[in-house]
Image: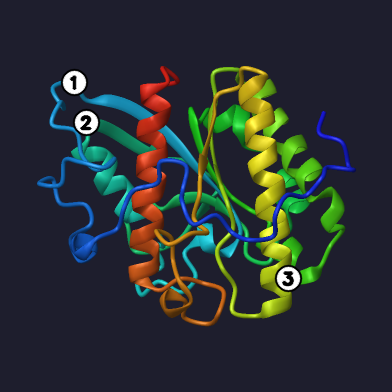
Amino acid sequence: MLRQSIVLLSRRPSLFGTGASEISSTCTNVYSPSITQHGQFSTLTATKKPLRLMPVGGSVTYGVGSSDGNGYRQFLGDMLRADGYQVQFVGSRRSGSMTNGDNEGWRGYRIDQIDSKVRKWVSTLAPRVFTVNAGSNDCVQDFRMEALGLRMENMLEFLWQANPASVIILSTLLVNRDKDINSRVMDANDQFRKLTELKAREGKKIVLADMNNSRGPQLDDLVDGTHPNDYGYKKMAAIWFNAIRRAREKGFL
């Protein structure tokens, strides 16, 4: 178990994602099948592989700030389908204009509160992959920050207990315009990076999706200092996509 006394690393956010996708001038069409390098699209799509994916988190997962309410989910789904997957988003909630808008995005909820919701649905909905972006509200509320990593670990361990084959893509938190909140975001991200390294050493199927760097949403990509606009959500989708491809390369999928 990750001890509550988890030692925080440097407070500077990483400038380099863990294999995160480079966002270039193609970001306006970030899921174009013509993009084939740097974690974008595979040309090997002969077999369509089913993928049940549960987006887990707070308002960013729900899609707040996007023009259509889809957040990153529609962009990510299109990318994965172009890469040969039959994607089915699952969750007890539904948001956005997309046909398959199911998710576990709980606006204003902390990690412990999201955990209590997710536990009710994992066995029934049987997701294989989880994209987890949770903890922003812990930072906003300054809620027991020293134990934030432990709360996340508790949730992830339940997901693996429900299905040891579960693949967890754990996201770092997005930059925040409020300097005090952003300081706590950096602390949270340090804990998430340590947690990912720990669980990987334990042999768990986990990959970090680092959103808090030059490739992720920047302050100019936020509509209110916290939630991304459509352009920011496209950046998130590309990073999620690249992390899922790394999971496949590791043999997790």
Task: Provide the residue designation for mark 2.
Answer: 84
Sequence order check, earlier mark of 1 and 3: 1
Distance between the alpha carbons at the discs numbered 2 and 1: 6 Å
Q: According to the image, label 3 marks what residue?
A: 140
Q: Position of residue 243 (x, y in %)?
A: 42, 39
The amino acid sitting under disc 3 is Val
Tell us which disc is closer to us: 2 or 3: 3
Residue 197: percent from left, percent from top: 64, 32
Lateral position of residue 191 relative to residue 64, left or right: right
The numbered mark, 2 or 1, whose residue comes first in the sequence reads 1
Pick the quarter of the image with the C terminus. Answer: top left
**Residue placed at 42% from the left, 32% from the top?**
52
Whether residues under marks 2 and 3 lie with C-beta atoms below 8 angstroms apart, the answer is: no
Instruction: Determine whether 163 is above or below 93 in the image.
Output: above
Asked whether, in this view, residue 143 is left or right of residue 58, the answer is right
Instruction: Name the secondary structure under disc 2.
Output: loop
Q: Is residue 245 left or right of residue 82?
A: right
Pointer 2 and pointer 1: residues touching (CB < 8 Å)?
A: yes
- How far from the left and from the top, in percent, is residue 176? 59, 73
Residue closest to the eye, 179 or 123: 179
- Residue under pointer 1: 47
Mark 3 closeness class: few <14, some 14–19, many ≥20 residues within 10 Å: some
Which amino acid, by three-letter code, is at mark 1?
Answer: Thr
Say if 19 sits above or below 161 in the image. Answer: below
Q: Residue at coordinates 32% horizontally, 57% vertically from top-left?
A: 98
Question: Rounded to the nearest whole Å, what is the CA distance between mark 2 and mark 3?
Answer: 38 Å
> Could you tell me if residue 122 is visible in this image?
yes
